[in-house]
Image (cartoon, helix red, strand yellow):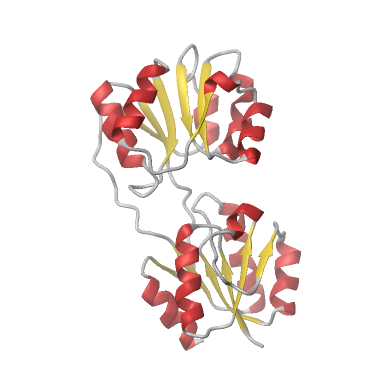
Amino acid sequence: MNKVWLIGGTSDSAIIASVLAESDLPLAITVTTASAQALYNHQPEIIIGCMNLAAMVCFCQQHQIKAVIDASHPYATEVSLQAIAVTNQLNIPYLRYERTHHQPLIQENVIELTSWEQLLAGDYLTAQRVFLTVGCQALPRFQPWQSRATLFARVLPKISSLETAIASGFTSDRLIALRPPISVATETALWQQWDISLVVTKASGKAGGEETKRLVAASLGIPLLVITRPQITYPRQTSIIAEVLTFCEAI
């Protein structure tokens, strides 16, 4: 049976999965972690694990994939680049879904950087009390800075996230496990309690809490470093779920 491959792992991809399932479109859904599987209620086929280029090619052939919907995380650039390469190689239609990211207003206390490398190669963190709201996967990058700055981090309340943080040099008194959304009041209180002098986050838009952090940074006069979204040229892209359905039905 011909199938649509939904590259998931985000809450948006779970919504897309429900819409496509309601239209009786046969799906093969892939996620990279077991915890992401919980996003998809009553979906019959969810494959867990990472795939390289060769594995993606085999996956498409074995599952008779006729269209690919890439709704992976915006920072999962390697996944998207490999998916684009595979669809080009096999001549399979590809569509990238990504929520519209509204450009925030320019703020004096906000510094936008294009990569982790730009951040860590600079002198932004030295001797600062830094609050990292960047996700647990980025925390190992900061391990060399544990002796050069006082680092705090927020992670999801999951054992795997806490284990990653601890392995990266974070002690229990410099960690907090909270699931978004985080209110302005909670965000403000936490920054003040830890006497934060610098905050690092990723460009995640309103849904990801970026707007809240900008508001708190402005109110407290604390610099906010924002790692901007990676730039990829997608063959075809949309931010409208209805267009995803139309794309699949046409294939």
Place of residue 10 in the rendered image (x, y in percent of width and height, measured from the top left):
50, 57
Q: Which residue is drawn at 36% across and 69% down?
A: 240
Residue 196 in sight in this render: no
Residue 207 in sight in this render: yes
Which of 127/27 is in front? 27
The quarter of the displayed image where residue 81 is located: bottom right
The quarter of the displayed image where residue 63 is located: bottom right
Q: Which residue is drawn at 57% across and 60% down?
A: 80
Compared with 184, 242 (above or below) is below
Place of residue 118 in the rendered image (x, y in percent of width and height, measured from the top left):
50, 31
Place of residue 41 in the rendered image (x, y in percent of width and height, measured from the top left):
54, 67
Q: Residue at x 49, y 65 (%)?
A: 14
Q: In which quarter of the image is the N terminus?
A: bottom right
Q: Residue furthest front?
A: 42
Place of residue 223 in the rendered image (x, y in percent of width and height, measured from the top left):
34, 24
- Say left or right for 2 vs 117: right
Q: Which residue is drawn at 63% across and 65% down?
A: 30
Count of numbered badges drawn on the protein: 0
The quarter of the displayed image where residue 6 is located: bottom right
Compared with 173, 224 (above or below) is below
Compared with 100, 208 (above or below) is above
Which of 233/156 is in front? 156
- Say left or right for 22 vs 160: left
